[in-house]
Amino acid sequence: MTGPNTIDPAWLPDAALRGIGSRRVTVEGEGPLVDTLRAEVAHAQDKFATSPTDGHVAFRLDAEADTGPEGFTLTRSGGRTTVTAAATAGLLYGYFQVVRLGAAAFTDAPEQTHRPALSRRMLNHWDNIDVHPVMGQVERGYAGGSLFWDDGRPRGDLGRVRAYARLLAACGINAVCVNNVNVHATEARLLTDRIDEVAAIATEFRAYGISVHLSVSFAAPVVLGGLSTADPLDDGVRDWWRTAADRVYAHIPDFGGFVVKADSEGQPGPFAYGRSHADGANLIADALAPHGGTVHWRAFVYNHTQDWRDRSTDRARAAYDHFAPLDGRFRDNAVLQVKHGPMDFQTREPVSPVIGALPRTRVAVELQATQEYTGQQRHVCALAPMWAEVLGFRPEGDDGPTVGGLAGSGGLVAVSNAGADPYWTRHPLAQFNLYAFGRLAWQPDAKPQQLLDEWIELTFDPEETIDPERLRSGLHAVLRDSWATYEKYTAPLGVGFMVQPGHHYGPSVDGYEYSPWGTYHFADRDGIGVDRSRATGTGYAAQYSKPWSQTYETPESCPDELLLFFHHVPYGHVLHSGTTVIQHIYDTHFEGVEEAEAAQRVWASLADLVAPARHARVAELYEEQLNSAREWRDHVNSYFLRKSGIPDAGGRRIH
Ligand code: GCW
């Protein structure tokens, strides 16, 4: 894999600091975040000291300012730009807003106040300390090893972690959970005798206003403490967790809290003791409460050893069935962390009905920036349009709140796509997913197109590019609709999976069809899809409130893109688009590959505008993407031609 000689600056190249670096800047206030701000300003001025510009930028603290703990007010007039905030975090976010605005930060404009819509904007790393024999070091990581650990030990030089913290703060992220939710034996000890390693990482993140969190094993009292039980109602167990939390806070006074995956895919949990997930979450919440910490308790609980012959069990139902009855039973410092869809980060899923179903519980929504099912950072797949759709969904219809609004109670979380690769995300264009996640967590109704423009302007210095407009339109052409393109050449109409088992890369239409994982499409010679209606299917559609329970109930009212998620239909079923299901499968698979080929050509045409190493890396990955997309097209089309016997109306070559 080609790459640069140094670590890529992503959306903070020095060139982006020109505006602030060439002006007179004053910073008022004290504290660690103000120290960071002063160091940022000094760095920018150092770079641009030789090109002084008139104008003044001031950062001032004003305890009376109505900005909340992280917001700021920006005023621009008469050559003076002022960031005012009630707290120091706001000054730092204001600094990055000034950077983001570029030249516009220094021209007259009406006063604006920015406050994050969500107070927790979190990344989850699925990093292990050790290299796991099957999963590698970072579970579902496609960007090299961990940023935190190398070769079983903490990285000696945490400069890379500091640089990461800076990038995250610049897009608005304020919390990071550093280790995998599947907690293996070595990593379990981060809670106890290896807590110093977490403390060292926390020092780097703290400088940028980011709290550190830890994934812990529910069985910790047994595996680390030597107790005979991890029963959440056992007094000894409760004491053990309290002592464990006290020790963590003695090392990291501003520690954020724990993340727990329990009774899920083999992880231990409260079910073993006949207790509920509220009992489990509250046990951990109570240990954290004296210190102000929060437990993020994951709702990803389902039976992964089901019998594929059993048509009555529907994995999509599981999270709601387990958690909706527990509403109101969680502590105030317990957050239920729900994947955005009911299954598992597929290219297309409906929004999880759990998100709107627990009004008396704090809910965080979990997205997946790491592209497990969306091309593994070898395919271009810009996820902001998917996430914006999820965040704008209204579980109770037009008059109810959006998912973004509901997540205000617990936060927005993404599984990180970053690793030790010099481009951070392996595919340089996947940096946009990380950036867009942070910005959407700050402002869930932000427009994906606008975020793309921001990211382009920061990442690709307009003044160093000979033709910024051609570059901008080229990048829009390759990124803007890349999720739609990816969807076209992979699994159709919301049916999901069809990936190779285990690593989940590339097509295998029946890969999971006769497996215990609960992820089926039920294709036969007559039709395809999962009947999840209330009337004749698994009843999953009835987990939604109106109007969605009705919308999803029948094939006539169900949106095309989710048809096969909710219904089993004949291949000749006519979609709202006017085409049949089988013809849609053929058409989209040919189109998807053509679109990817066109994107590859656009990328090639940008060779004179993009740094050679970055251009080469992306070009190399496009070769892989195209090979893989053709595999997808040919597997899926051939499979359905053979199953259905219905020829392509376009008479194209299917194998
Ligand atoms: O998406 C699935 C992944 C697992 C992951 C799990 C989860 C960390 O295939 O690798 O485990 O979800 O979210 O817990």
Image: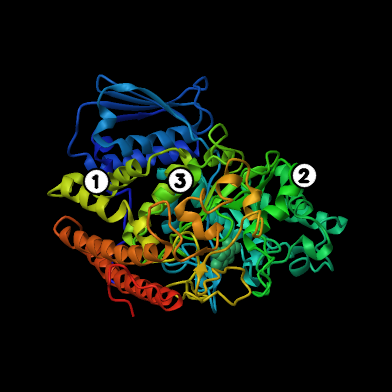
Determine whether the residue tagged by mark 1 lies in a helix, strand or loop: helix
Q: Mark 3 or mark 1: which comes first in sequence?
A: 1
Rendered image: mark on residue 15: 1
Quadrant location of the C terminus? bottom left
For this orientation, the residue located farthest to the right is 235
Q: Three-letter amino acid code at disc 1?
A: Ala
Disc number lying in front (3 or 1): 3
Residue pointed to by mark 3: 389
Q: CA distance from mark 1 to mark 2?
A: 51 Å
Disc number lying in front (2 or 3): 3
Q: CA distance from mark 2 to mark 3?
A: 30 Å
Question: Image quadrant of ligand 1?
Answer: bottom right
**Number of marks:** 3
Q: Mark 1 or mark 2: which comes first in sequence?
A: 1
Q: Three-letter amino acid code at disc 2?
A: Arg
User: Residue 225: horizontal and vertical position, in percent?
Assistant: 77, 65
The residue under the point 49% across, 65% down is 570
The residue under the point 40% across, 72% down is 636
User: Residue 231: horizontal and vertical position, in percent?
Assistant: 83, 61
